Image (tube, rainbow, N blue to C red):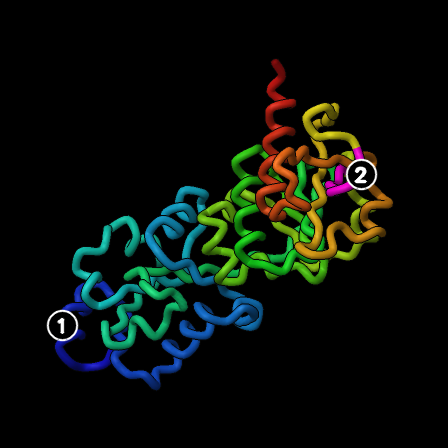
């Protein structure tokens, strides 16, 4: 531990106190919190803020590290700092430099990056086809979790599901979903549930369609829509009524509407 006033505050239960900008662990944490690909290199995931940390704990995930700002450490909830086998306290002068957020939260967890799981053939699924925007991807994960879709599959070219921006946008949805990424269209042959895709100009109107359950919803690239090779695998194409006359919907909004329609159809009248 680095000597100084902060060491006294951190000494009781913290394993490491960081007060030097050249500290190797601090540099690793900064890369993990700010980089889109660092989680793959380090095989670790950065969760920032109490809501995300508690969401992981509630789903049975155990952090590798619990990381706290120096000024927050004395009042940190015991359930959070006891959750990790190792606790790190960072001086307030360095804390803001770790986070990519304009108003950083005073605590974070570091989790092990999950092993790449196998595709579940019969699970209610959301399929992401080359979605670029991390906010859209995270929002769709939230909708998937809310409406009973247990699995999210991401084709190559989609924003990385465990990148910091997607994790933040997912708001805890990651921890209740089966996530598989880096897939090719050919890998989808293993799916045994009907595949539905959206279109802005063809297919049956969503509000009139008979929706199967379980199923897989394919959501396409923000500008290009669903890849033709993926659309060719679909058992059903649907479109969303837009009486306001807009040409198309944001993909996260479209996904929420479609997944909600499936959830309502599943519940019945």
Residue 260, given in percent of the width and then of the height, sits at: 59, 31
Of the two numbered discs 2 and 1 in the rendering, the one whose residue sits closer to the viewer: 2
**Magenta region:** 196-203
Which quadrant of the structure image shows residue 92?
A: bottom left
Q: Is residue 193 left or right of residue 10?
A: right
In this rendering, would 40 be left or right of 34? right
- If the image is split into quadrants, where does the C terminus sit? top right
Separation (CA) of disc 2 from disc 1: 67 Å
- Compared with 139, 156 (above or below) is below
| Quadrant of the rendering where the N terminus is positioned | bottom left
Q: Position of residue 197 (x, y in %)?
A: 75, 41
Residue at 50% in and 71% down: 35
Count every numbered label the image shows and give the total: 2
Q: Quadrant of residue 246?
A: top right
The residue sitting at 26% across, 66% down in the picture is: 69
200 magenta-colored: yes
Q: Residue at x 69, y 62 (%)?
A: 157
**Label ID, residue 8:** 1
In this rendering, position of residue 171 left or right of residue 140: left
Q: Nearer the viewer, residue 242 or 175?
A: 242
The answer to whether residue 236 is magenta is no
Crowding at dot 1, Cα within 10 Å, few <14 / some 14-19 / many 20+, comes out as: few
Q: Which residue is tagged 2?
A: 202
């Amino acid at each position: 531990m680095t000597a100084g006033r902060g060491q006294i505050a951190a000494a009781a239960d913290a394993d490491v106190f960081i007060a030097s900008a050249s500290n190797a662990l601090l540099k690793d944490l900064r890369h993990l919190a700010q980089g889109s690909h660092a989680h793959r290199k380090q095989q670790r995931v950065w969760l920032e803020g109490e809501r995300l940390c508690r969401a992981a704990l509630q789903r049975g995930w155990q952090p590798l590290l619990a990381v706290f700002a120096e000024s927050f450490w004395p009042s940190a909830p015991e359930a959070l700092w006891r959750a990790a086998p190792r606790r790190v306290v960072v001086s307030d002068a360095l804390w803001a430099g770790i986070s990519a957020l304009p108003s950083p939260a005073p605590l974070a967890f570091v989790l092990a990056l999950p092993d790449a799981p196998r595709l579940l053939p019969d699970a209610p699924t959301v399929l992401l086809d080359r979605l670029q925007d991390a906010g859209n991807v995270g929002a769709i994960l939230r909708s998937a979790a809310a409406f009973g879709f247990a699995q999210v599959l991401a084709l190559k070219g989609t924003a990385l599901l465990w990148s910091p921006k997607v994790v933040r946008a997912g708001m805890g949805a990651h921890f209740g979903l089966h996530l598989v990424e880096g897939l090719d269209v050919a890998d989808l042959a293993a799916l045994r549930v009907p595949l539905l895709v959206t279109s802005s100009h063809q297919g049956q109107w969503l509000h009139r369609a008979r929706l199967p359950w379980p199923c897989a919803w394919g959501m396409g690239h923000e500008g290009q829509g669903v890849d033709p090779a993926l659309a060719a695998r679909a058992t059903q194409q649907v479109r969303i009524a837009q009486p306001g006359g807009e040409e198309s919907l944001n993909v996260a909004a479209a996904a929420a509407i479609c997944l909600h329609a499936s959830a309502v159809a599943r519940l019945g009248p």
